[in-house]
Amino acid sequence: MTELDTIANPSDPAVQRIIDVTKPSRSNVKTTLIEDVEPLMHSIAAGVDFIEVYGSDSSPFPSDLLDLCRRQNIPVRLIDSSIVNQLFKGERKARTFGIARVPRPARFSDIAGRSGDVVVLDGVKIVGNIGAIVRTSLALGASGIILVDSDITSIADRRLQRASRGYVFSLPVVLSGREEALDFIRDSGMRLMTLKADGDISVKELGDSPDRLALLFGSEKGGPSDLFEKASSASVSIPMMSSTESLNVSVSLGIALHERIDRNLAASR
C-alpha cells in the first residue's frame, strides 16, 4: 500500500478546517464532518462531495475505504494521533473521518420523482430512532422521508449521520412544516395512513393496496398531531400482545413497510 502523507503540524489548514466544522455554534453549515468507515463509504457511494478524508496515524487506514477514495479522487491523509486527541477532546475519538460539502436540502420534487411509499414522521425527535428509520426506509423501498417538528435543522447533523450509518444521504429526507407536507401528499394523490395503537384496520391490510401511500408515524409520546389525524384516510394498528403497551416507532415503521415490500419493490423496477 502506498504510504500516506501525515499531518504533523497543528497549524496545517486541514486541522483548522476540522476545528471549524465541529463547532456547535456554526450558523451557516456548508461543510460537515463524517466519521467512521461505514458512514464514510455509504456517503461516498451516495455521491457526497468530500474535500478530504483522514485517518489517525496510530491505526492502519482501511484498504477498502482507501480504494474507494482513490476511485473517486478524494484526497486522503493521516493525522498525528496527538493532534487527533486534541481535535476530539472530550468526544469519542474517530479513527477515520472526512470533511464533506453539505448536499443541497432535499425537496418534495426529489420524493415525487420516485415510486415508493413516503414516510412521514410527525414530531419524532429521538435522533437514534430517525437514523434507524432512514436505514429501514431505504432497505424496504420507501421513496423518501418527511421530517416534521423533529428539531433537526439539517441532515448534516452529526448525530443523524452516525445513527443512520451515513445512509441519510442515500434517499431524500425533507424537513417540512405540517401544512407543506399535507399539501404535497394531497397534490401527489396519495392516501395518508396513520399508524396508531387503536387503528381502524390491521397493518396486514396495507399490503392489499397497489397505490402509493404516505405512512404517518407520530411522536414517541404524543402520537400524531390533530392536523394529520384529520387528514388521514385511515388509521392502522399493529396487532400485539395485550401486555405490551406500544412498539418503538422505528420497529413499527419496519413492520408497516415490510407489509408494503412487494408493492414497493415492484414499483422500483
Image (spheres, rainbow, N blue to C red):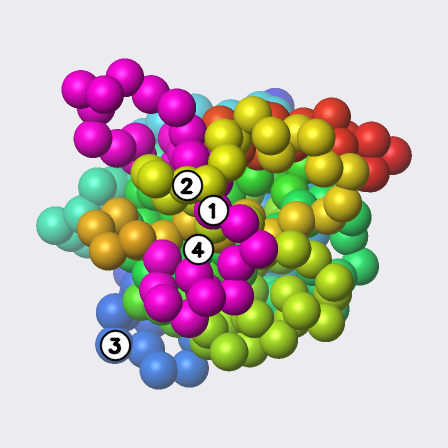
Farthest residue to the left: give it.
90
Q: Which residues fall within the magenta stretch?
A: 224-253
Q: Quadrant of the N terminus?
A: top right
Reading the image, the residue beneath label 4 is 121
Image coords of residue 83 (percent x, y)? 26, 50
Q: In the rendered structure, which amino acid carries the disc numbered 4?
A: Leu
Reading the image, the residue beneath label 1 is 235
Q: Is residue 20 left or right of residue 245?
A: right
Mark 4 and mark 1: Cα distance apart in space: 15 Å
Of the residues under marks 1 and 3, which one precedes in the sequence? 3
Q: In the rendered structure, which amino acid carries the disc numbered 3?
A: Ser
Q: Quadrant of residue 22?
A: bottom left
Of the residues under marks 4 and 1, which one precedes in the sequence? 4
Mark 3 and mark 4: Cα distance apart in space: 26 Å
Up-down relation of residue 251 to residue 148 (above or below): above
Query: Is label 1 or label 3 in front?
Result: 1
Which label belongs to residue 199? Answer: 2
Reading the image, the residue beneath label 3 is 25
At 53% across and 49% down in the image, what residue appears? 234
Q: Secondary structure at mark 4?
A: strand
Please say if the residues under marks 4 and 2 sit with CB atoms less than 8 Å apart. Answer: no
Query: Is label 4 or label 2 in front?
Result: 2
| Residue 11 on the magenta span | no
Farthest residue to the front: give it.
200
Q: In the rendered structure, which amino acid carries the disc numbered 1?
A: Ser
